[in-house]
Amino acid sequence: MSHPFRDRTAIVGVGHSPCSKTPTISPYLNTVRTLKQAIADAGLEPSDIDGVCALATGGEPSPLDMVQALGLPGVTWYGGGLGGGVGPGLVANAAMAVASGLCTTAIAYRTMAVPRPGDGTYNFFGPAKLGGAANFIQPYGHGVFMQYFAAWYQRKRKVFGVTDEQMGAYVTAMRDNATRNPHAVLGKPMTMDEYLACPYVAEPLRRFDCDMPVDVSGAVIVTTAERARDLRQKPVYISSVSTGTGPRPHMAFWHDYDQSAAHFAAKTIWKNAGMGPEDMDFGMIYDGFAPLVLYNLEEYGFVPKGEAGRFLGDGGHLRDGAFPLNPHGGNNSEGRSHAIGHMVEATQQLRGQAGARQLKKANTTFVNGGAIMLAGAVVLHN
Amino acid sequence: MDRPLPVIDDINRDCWEGARNNRLVIYRCGECRYWIHPPLEACPQCQSERVAGEEVSGKGAVYSWSVMYSKGNPGFDHKLPYATVIVELPEQEHLFTIGNIDCDPKDIEIGMPLEVTFEKINDEVTLPQWRPATGAAR
Ligand SMILES: [Zn+2]
């Protein structure tokens, strides 16, 4: 029997700001412009929006800020929470609200910003005064986000035999894909030798494995499938959504580094979609740190456990490979958007509007965010 | 800037008092005997609030590690590069603690046996640290 959520909702509008490595306009204004763009893309008016889903972390304007900014007269749903890996998790939130009748048309967005003068060291988790788990981390100099990922990646490499060349095959392919993406901040080709010469930020993680902080905003509008058919764009139907996490949700003290949060988000996504990983034409796989692709490919069933490194080494992820990944270059090369960029690109590919990036076969796709501690996923078709 | 030091409170006091006396102390549930680290006010397995520190063996094994090359941790920028290890304690599967290790980072391997050491910072704070286990007898 079909899952009651399946294909009840569709993406009808997207917006995506330029990406910039240096500060541009305020995150507030960037969000307002991007939401306007998404609403226009859908052929809607702001007054049609009655649901707003966002995270409101890291300087991002809150759902309430955007209700005011757009003058929304009748919001009946606003939310976001931890966001299930952010971009896809927020779209999941919007789709659930629409499918359950809490609102008719919801907008999900994520806005990121490079540090402004006076902001703290980027991604250092430390308050001046410690407390909680930080008491047992920061006195040892393990308080920078990428160190958590580095320790995960180290274990992945040693237990499953992932090589530098396999990770390099991923990153160099993203740079190549990004040459076709006008938004991308790292849109120049990179050779394997350049990748291998890249210094470590936290061994085994190289600088080129990490996405670049940027000013960016992305937005996705979700409405009912019935309503979607009357709107401007070809509907992109949402087959299923999921989020998940493990029993000890802390990236350093996580219960098992060989079983990431994606494992839990994967439990329901395919059954509810009525499709499997083998039915996806391409993958929009979260890569805020490039090695996260390994966990996501394996946990969502695109390759057997331990085989993701070999898949990348064999070029399965290339534009003309067996299962193309991230034709826009991923967060790795486009810029850090917590996978809202993946959501926008997925929509444009399924509409056939991806221009120079357009894949030959793009009728179904899987989008995910996060991997290690928080995970969210969306299955889409046109 | 000096490295941040733990703020000793009612939730974690047993750990830091233990370390001050050169004993590795981990919180444990008084009901179901589950080990809890970092400490919490209630046991995540049975929700009992009867949790208290108990001394553990002081042995461990490398679960994973990374070598930091970037600035950003207060008090550590002059030590780059340095290793931080995720240590699995033998008292319970996947019971992890984090520390620095007294060896060349190139010699670290997953599963490598470790033993605890203690680094006195001041009269209040001593940090449990790690070194390769000295001989199989230990
Ligand atoms: Zn208990």
Image: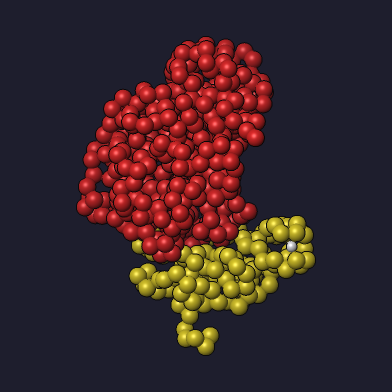
Chain colours: A red, B yellow
Above or below for B99 versus A11: below
Taking the spot 37% from the left edge, 38% from the top edge, the residue there is: A326
Above or below for A367 versus A76: below
Question: Is A118 in front, or is A69?
Answer: A69
Residue A284 showing in the rendered view: no
Above or below for A62 versus B22: above
Above or below for A245 versus A35: below
Left or right: A45 as drawn, with respect to B8: left
Could you tell me residue A133's position as x and y percent?
59, 56
Taking the spot 44% from the left edge, 51% from the top edge, the residue there is: A303
Could you tell me residue A291's position as x and y percent?
40, 51
Q: In which quarter of the image is ligand 1?
A: bottom right
Could you tell me residue A349's position as x and y percent?
39, 28
- Say which quarter of the image contains residue A47: top right
Left or right: A189 as drawn, with respect to B74: left
Taking the spot 37% from the left edge, 73% from the top edge, the residue there is: B107
Residue A278 showing in the rendered view: yes
Could you tell me residue A272's position as x and y percent?
59, 37
Residue farthest to the front?
Answer: A1
Question: Is A50 in front, or is A144?
Answer: A50
Instruction: Indicate the quadrant containing the N terminus of chain A: top left, top right, bottom left or bottom right.
Output: top right
Question: Is A97 in front, or is A232?
Answer: A232
Left or right: A151 as drawn, with respect to B81: right
- Say which quarter of the image contains residue A227: top right
